[in-house]
Image (cartoon, helix red, strand yellow):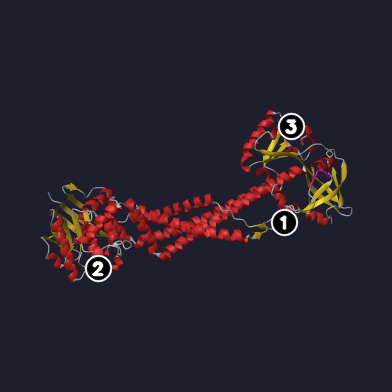
Amino acid sequence: MNQWIKLSFRNIIKNKRRSFVTLMAIAMGFTAINLFSGYTHSTYEGMRASAIRGSGIGHLTIYKKGWNKFGKSDPDKYMIDKKEINKIIKIIEENDSVILATPRLDISGIVSNGRNSTIFMAQGVIPADDKTILGTFFDFQPVTGKTLNTKKEYGVQMATDLAQYLQLKPEDDAVVMAATLDGQLNALDIQISGVYDTGLDAINDKFMKVPFRFAQSLYDSEKADRIVVLLDNWKNTSIVQHQIMKQLKDAGIKCEIKTWEELSAFYSNVKNMFDRVFLFIFSIVLDIVIMSTVNTMGMSVIERTREIGTLRALGIKKRGINMLFAIEGAMIGFIGSVVGVAFHMMIWFIIFIASPTYTPPGSSSPVPLQVDFLPGTIFFMLMCMIFLALIAAILPARRAANQNVVDALGHV
Amino acid sequence: MNLIEMKNIIKDYYLGETIVQALRGIDLKIEKEEFTAIWGPSGSGKTTLLNLIGTIDEPSSGDLYFNGDKINNITDNNKSEFRNNEIGFIFQTFNLIPVLSALENVMLPLQIMGVSASKAKKEAFMRLSDVELEQYVNSRPDKMSGGQRQRVAIARALITNPSIVLADEPTANLDSKTSNSIIEIMKKINKKDKTTFIFSTHDQRLLDQMDRLIQLEDGRITE
C-alpha cells in the first residue's frame, strides 16, 4: 500500500503548478465553508441567547389554553389567576432542569410626560427573576440610572428612544394610561428608574419594563398572561416541555406551552436564511472541488496513459488502476483540506485578535463579528473533502482502467 | 510440452470501416528456454504477435495455449495475474515509471504480486546487480542513459522469474555498444536462469545472437 501512496504523492508533486491550483481551490473552499460555518454557529448561539435571555422569553412560556387564539379579545378569561400561578410554578419547579419559573404580564397604553404622549408596550416582570433570566445579557443592556427593583413599585426602565422622545431621564416622573381588564380607563404615575437600549430598533421607541405588581395594578388584576420558564440548557427544551405538559395535565391545568423557537420567529427566519446560504456556498465549493479534481485527474490520466498501459502489462488489475487514482484524488482532497485548516486557523485568529464589529439589520448597536472554532465541523469537512475528491477521481480513474492495454502503451 | 502454442491465430484491426488483417492464421510453437526472434519488415505483425502472447491483446480468432492451458478466453483479472506471474515485458521505449527510482521500478512487479516491500527491495537490488546497475538504484529514469534505462527494464522484466520475457525492439533506441551489452546480458540470463526470450526485432546484431528465427511477412509465418 505504501508503494501506491508514494506513487500517488509523487505524481501529485510532479505537476506542481496544476496540483497547486487544485489544492488551493480545495483549501479556499474548505476555508470558506468552515469560516462561514463558524460564523453561523456563533450567530445562532448569539441569537438563541438573545431570544431566550436578551428578549426575556425564556426557554418555555406557559399560557392558559386558548390564550394565543382568544386572549386578545377576552384577556381576563384567558389569563392565569393568582392561585393557578402559584400551583403551576410549584409543579414546574419540581423539574430538575428548571432554574426558574416566573409570571409575566404584558401591558400597553399611553405614556405621557405632561406635554407629549405616545403609545407604549411594557413587560411586567419580577425584577429579581428578570435579572436571572437576563444572565450575562444584563451586562449587554447597560442601564443609565437604576435597574428595576421591588422596593420602588412605580419605578420603570424605559427604552432610550422613547425616553428621548418624551425628554425623560432617570428620576423624572411621567404618567401611564391604559384600559383595565374591565374596560375602565386607569392612570398611574411612574418614575423613570433607568433608561436602556433594548438592542432592537423596532421597539426602542415604545418599550418599557415595569415591575409585575405595577403591571397588575394598571390592569387592575391579580392575574398574569404567561409564566416564563428558564432551563439549565436549551437542549432540554423539548424534553422538559413534554414533561411539564404532562405534569400540568395530571394536575388538571389546561394550558399551552410554547418553546423559545416557536416564539422567536426572527431566530427561525434568520436560521433558515443562513442555512440556505450555507447550502448555496457548500454547493459552489462542492462543484469547485469536484470539477478541479476531475480536471486534474483527467489531465493526469491523459498524460499517464502509457504509464497506465505499462502498469496493466506488468499485471495491475483494473481495480488497481482505479485504486491508484482514487488514492491520488483522496490525497489531493486531504492535502488541500490540511492547507485549508491552516488558512482557516490563520483567518480565525486574525478575526479573534482584531475583533471587528458590524451592525446587523434590526439591531440598534454594533455587535462583534464572531467566528466559532469548531473542531468537530472541521474534521467532518476534512472527511467530506477527502471523500468528494476521491469520488471525483473515480470517473477519470475508471476511464484509465478501461483503456485497452495496447492502445495505452502506444499512446504518445 | 510447448510453453506457447498458437493455433490458427487471426488478428484483424478496424480502421474506420476498413479491416486490416495483422495476422492471418498463425500456427506457432515455442518451447522452454528458447532464445527466439520474430523478425520481418515493419507492419508484418511482429508486435501484434508479441502482444497476443503477452495477453495484452486478444486474437480475433484462434487459440493460444500456455503450458497446454488455453489462455485467450480467461478473464481480465486472470490475464493480469498471468502477466504478473509468467510474463516479463521489455519495451522499445523502456516504459519506466518516471516518478519512481530504478530500484522502485524494479520492485513494482513484485509489489503488484503482493510481496512485502523489504523482500521486494532485496530482490530488486539483486536484479539490478545482475544488470550492473548497483550504483543507480536511487536514480530516477530521467537521470539515466538509454542503455541504463533498458537495463532497468530488463531487471524489472526478470524480477518475478517469469517463464517468458517478451522484448519488443529492445535495442531500437540504443547505440551499437549499448545494444551489444544489452544483448549479452539477456543471453547470459537465458543461459543462467533458463528463461525463454521472445524478441520482436529487425536489428541484425540481435538476430545474429538468436537460437531460432521466425520470419513474418504480411501477417504470415514464412519460415
Q: Is residue A26 left or right of residue A119?
A: left
Q: Nearer the viewer, residue B170 or A287?
A: B170
Name the element at disc 3: helix
> Mark 2 belongs to which amino acid?
Gly
Same-chain status of marks 1 and 3: yes
Q: Chain of mark 3?
A: A
Q: Which residues are magenta?
A: A148-152
What residue is rendered at 82% in x and 56% in y? A165
Q: Amino acid at mark 1?
A: Ser
- Residue tagged 1: A364
Q: Which residue is mark 2?
A: B146
Residue B101, horizontal then vertical, whole percent: 30, 62
* Element class at badge 1: loop
- Quadrant of the snapshot with the C terminus of chain A: bottom left
Q: Are marks 3 and 2 in contact (CB under 8 Å)?
A: no
Compared to B166, does A248 lie above or below?
above
Between B90 and A367, the one lying in front of the other is A367
Where residue B172 appears, as percent x and y from the top left, is: 21, 67
Chain on which label 1 sits: A
Using the rendered view, name the quadrant where residue A10 is placed: bottom left
- Tell me, yes or no, whether the highlighted magenta stretch contains residue A362: no
As measured in the structure, the alpha-carbon distance from the residue carrying label 1 to the one carrying label 2 is 77 Å
Residue corresponding to mark 3? A87
Residue A58 in the image: x percent, y percent?
69, 43
Q: CA distance from mark 3 to mark 2?
A: 97 Å
For label 1, count other residues whose C-alpha is less than 10 Å away and answer few (under 14), some (14-19) or many (20+): some
C-alpha span from label 1 to label 3: 39 Å
Residue A369 visible in the displayed image: yes
